[in-house]
């Protein structure tokens, strides 16, 4: 579980993307490389969705993460590159943008945005802006994980000292 501070930060990332991308829906998802699970960490509109399959295609998100590059779908109904990405069309999405969150050790998640009514390309500026924000979000997630690991180690050390003191 990541810290509340990180949740606020990721929510702010989506808030800042809203006026630039103008998505109908957006989310930041974290990827667990060990299990392959995608976890929704921040969502717009607020609280509307609990999992990626509620609003997006996990195929699109997983492909962006696998390829480690921005994936754009211009019209989900006509998309031939991702024939298994039917959940986007089923959820009402037309165009989508998915930017992987890349950490120092590999992919850690994705930033996803889609538009329900508009079937077309996001502009180059919108894609560049989303990629820049994804880089900041990735750095924030990595930093939060490092702080959590350090806190866990400090607590473990203090617990060991406590047990050692009681044993004497």
Image: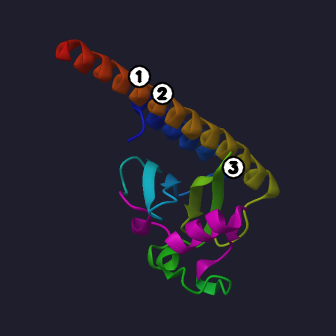
* Residue holding disc 1: 154
* Residue 130 image label: 3
Query: Tags 3 and 2 in contact by the CB under 8 Å rule?
Result: no
Q: Is residue 60 magenta?
A: yes
What segment carries the magenta color?
Answer: 50-76
For the residues marked 2 and 1, what is the alpha-carbon distance in whole angstroms? 6 Å
Q: Quadrant of the N terminus?
A: top left
Say which label, 3 or 2, has the lower sequence index: 3
Image disc number at residue 168: none
Residue at 77% across, 50% down: 128
Seen in the picture, residue 156 relative to 117 is either above or below; the reply is: above
Looking at the image, is mark 3 or mark 2 nearer the viewer? 2
Q: Is residue 132 above or below residue 120?
A: above
- Callout 3 crowding tier (Cα within 10 Å): few <14, some 14–19, many ≥20: many
Taking the image as shown, residue 125 lies to the left or right of residue 3, namely right
**Are dots 2 and 1 in contact, CB under 8 Å?**
yes
Task: Determine the CA span between mark 3 and mark 2.
Answer: 30 Å
Tell me the residue that label 2 is attached to.
150
Q: Which residue is depicted at the point 57% across and 64% down?
A: 115
Q: Position of residue 40 (x, y in %)?
A: 43, 54
């Amino acid at each position: 579980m990541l810290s509340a501070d990180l949740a606020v930060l990721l929510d702010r990332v989506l808030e800042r993307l809203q006026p630039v991308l103008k998505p109908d829906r957006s989310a930041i998802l974290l990827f667990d490389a060990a299990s392959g699970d995608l976890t929704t960490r921040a969502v717009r509109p607020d609280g509307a969705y609990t999992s990626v399959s509620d609003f997006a295609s996990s195929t699109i998100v997983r492909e962006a993460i696998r390829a480690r590059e921005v994936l754009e779908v211009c019209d989900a109904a006509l998309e031939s590159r991702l024939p298994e990405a039917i959940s986007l069309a089923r959820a009402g999405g037309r165009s989508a943008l998915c930017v992987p969150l890349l950490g120092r050790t590999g992919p850690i998640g994705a930033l996803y945005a889609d538009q329900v009514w508009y079937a077309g390309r996001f502009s180059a500026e919108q894609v560049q802006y989303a990629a820049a924000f994804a880089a900041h979000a990735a750095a924030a997630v990595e930093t939060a994980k490092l702080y959590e690991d350090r806190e866990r180690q400090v607590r473990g050390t203090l617990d060991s000292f406590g047990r050692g003191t009681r044993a004497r």
